Image (cartoon, grey):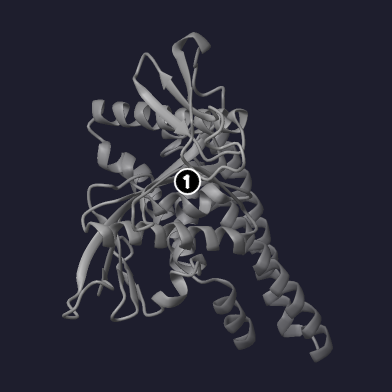
Amino acid sequence: MEIIKNMETKLTENKELEEKIIDYLEKVEKNQITRKLESKKRNLLLAAKQEYDEANKTKKDYQELILELNEEEKREFFNEIKNLELKKVKIIEKIKERIVEKEGTKQNIAIEIRPGTGGTEAGLFARDLYRMYHKFAEKQGWKVEMVESNIDNAGNFTFVAFLVKGKNVFKWLKNEAGVHRVQRVPQTENKGRIHTSTATVVVLPEIQDIVLNIHFQDLRIDTYRSSGAGGQHVNTTDSAVRVTHLPTGVVATSQDGRSQHDNKEKALFILKSRLLEKLQNDEAQKTGNLRSAMIGTAERSEKIRTYNYPQNRVTDHRLGISWNRLNFIIEGDLEELCKKLIDYQVEKEIVNELAN
């Protein structure tokens, strides 16, 4: 039995969160918070819980039987128990996705990075963040496409927007939105003083067309000559595209695509995402619940993470956790951090559902 306990510890990283999820689903099952969940989502959650309960019951039955078996039979049952525990972990991951899923969104995203306070150093930090997300995307097998970039005389970003496409992109990177802070000694600093700079990251999910009722006559599409690095046609044709949604004044541009058609598609992606964000924020303000609406999507009013170079430390202020491996994280090693943020968001969603 000690072997089983050790195995369970290794397979389940956060048993406490798993227990909270199951407790939450039991309340959903007993109709205590059913009215707060749309029907489709509730049915999917209950189906997943039933699958989890069946796997858990079978595992417990095997654990009782194992005491009566010889050593060879025990080894076979240990493998069965291990497989059932793995199945439970996968079901919990599926339930987490259901809890935090955003209706009407796909998995592809647009990321926008803007330097904040700190002058040139902030622009350099914005470039470092872009590189970090680009490397993480490469490790995950995702595709990165540049939308728009503005660069200063020093070669640093004053603004950059890019698409990230692939499996579970939104799930992994949605919690990156917010103010990121860096503390380090700039190359131009002669006295070795540490400077603090910031950059704001915005994460916009791709929107399903059915969610936004956009009429073509409400759009103004302008073309102009691109100044970005889009290939041989840049600076020779009017390939850059600006799309304006006339009723709201929301604007999106793309200039770093390979053609006018490519830039138009990317600009429309950004426009639809910004429109949904605006509608959600407007609705949240009406109901006086803006802060809770911003969890996991924006949180731009305060810093969410600090990158301290002298101490090689990254601190996520939402989690209250630090990692002394900034040198790896800034090179795209974000998996552990993102996993913990997903669990953080799941717990937040459960608390909010039970509180309302």
Instruction: Tell me: 255 left or right of 86.
Output: left
Q: Nearer the viewer, residue 113 or 262?
A: 262
The one of 290 and 312 positioned closer to us in this rendering: 312
Residue positioned 55% across, 30% down in the render: 239
Q: Nearer the viewer, residue 67 or 127?
A: 127
User: What residue lies at 46% left-to-right and 39% top-to-bottom?
Assistant: 227
Amino acid type indicated by mark 1: Val
**Can you give x and y, in whole percent of width and height, for residue 180 in the image?**
31, 58
Quadrant in the picture for residue 260: top right
Q: Nearer the viewer, residue 20 or 64?
A: 20
**Is 73 on the left or on the right of 51, as rendered?**
right
Q: Residue furthest front?
A: 236
Taking the image as drawn, is residue 14 in sight?
no
In which quadrant is the C terminus drawn?
A: top left
Whether residue 92 is situated above or below residue 41 in the rendered picture: below
Rendering coords of residue 210 (x, y %): 56, 22
Q: Which residue is mark 1?
A: 100
x then y, percent, for residue 225: 48, 30
Point out residue 62 in the picture as x, y percentages from the top left corner.
Answer: 72, 73
